[in-house]
């Protein structure tokens, strides 16, 4: 297979399924052969990213992702897509493992804010405790000239309840919880737009789309960037 890309997924599995579903839905097709060629690594046993970020005595997820990247690199994919915001904590370390580009979900998400909310000044972030505690989005948001608004402890607790209890553990999303998180960030925290900085939140948005308030959905955005890049390669424009 040539002109394919590789999805580094399984973090978690429902979010990876969401990525593939959205990618296929958005691909312009009239026949089987119009869909994109890609490999999905649903590496569900990768250790929890947040646990390691908060406590380096916990199992490190990076060696397994690096091994995945090194195993796939000889197959010569055009690019990699890393379907986990929190795993970008060691993005430079992962990119150093291959000469093949890895799309940067965080950078792409922040870049898209100018199109989602052109007049935005205050950008909120909903994400895992690891993403928030490590300041993963900080430099991207600040370099783009925005003021970052992080969730309060209560909002963070509610976010992780949705991510870990409802989606990762129970296998479903609670639309009411999800929409309340976004509303709280917009109305109570005075944000102009909210980054969904966890692919489980993107899954929640797919299941129960947020239509009242502006959100920068990291997974939806990286789906679009994947599609654009893959089609450009197919058409010989890259």
Image: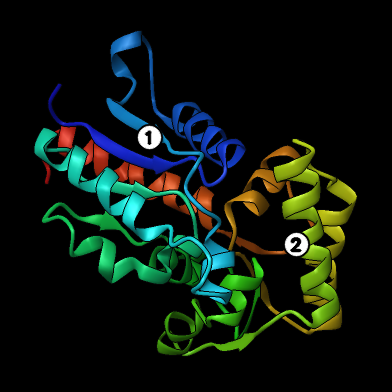
Q: Taking 69 as reference, is 13 above or below it?
A: above
Residue at the image position 67 percent from the left and 41 percent from the top: 206
The reply, left or right, for residue 116 in relation to residue 2 is: right
Question: Which quadrant of the figure has residue 38?
Answer: top left
Q: Tell me how the rendering is colored.
A: rainbow
N-terminal-most mark, 1 or 2: 1
Residue at the image position 43 percent from the left and 70 percent from the top: 89
Q: Taking 98 as reference, is 209 above or below it?
A: above
* Mark 2, residue position: 160
Residue at the image position 81 percent from the left and 70 percent from the top: 157
Q: Residue furthest front?
A: 57
Position of residue 152 measured from the top left corner of the image (x, y, whole percent): 79, 83
Question: Which quadrant of the figure has residue 106?
Answer: bottom left
Q: Taking 148 as reference, is 109 above or below it?
A: above
The reply, left or right, for residue 192 in relation to residue 85 is: right
Q: Distance between the residues labelled 1 and 2?
A: 25 Å
Q: Which mark is residue 107?
A: none
Q: Where is the N terminus found, in terms of image quarters?
A: top left
- Dot 2 falls on a residue whose secondary structure is helix
């Amino acid at each position: 297979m040539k002109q394919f890309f590789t999805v580094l997924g399984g973090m978690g599995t429902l979010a990876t399924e969401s990525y593939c579903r959205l990618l296929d839905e958005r691909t312009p097709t009239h026949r089987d052969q119009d869909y994109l060629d890609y490999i999905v690594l649903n590496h569900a046993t990768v250790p929890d990213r947040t646990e390691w970020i908060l406590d380096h005595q916990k199992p490190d997820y990076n060696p397994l992702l690096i091994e995945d990247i090194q195993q796939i690199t000889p197959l010569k994919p055009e690019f990699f897509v890393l379907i986990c915001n929190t795993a970008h904590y060691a993005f430079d370390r992962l990119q150093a493992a291959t000469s093949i580009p890895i799309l940067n979900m965080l950078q792409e998400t922040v870049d898209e804010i100018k199109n989602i909310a052109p007049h935005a000044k205050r950008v909120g972030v909903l994400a895992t405790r690891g993403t928030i505690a490590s300041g993963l989005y900080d430099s991207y948001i600040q370099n783009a000239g925005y003021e970052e608004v992080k969730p309060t402890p209560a909002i963070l607790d509610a976010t992780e309840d949705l991510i870990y209890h409802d989606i990762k553990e129970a296998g479903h999303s609670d639309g009411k919880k999800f929409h309340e998180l976004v509303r709280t960030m917009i109305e109570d925290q005075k944000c102009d737009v909210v980054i969904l900085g966890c692919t489980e939140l993107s899954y929640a948005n797919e299941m129960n789309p947020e239509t009242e308030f502006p959100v920068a959905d990291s997974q939806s955005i990286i789906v679009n960037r994947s599609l654009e890049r893959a089609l450009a390669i197919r058409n010989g424009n890259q």
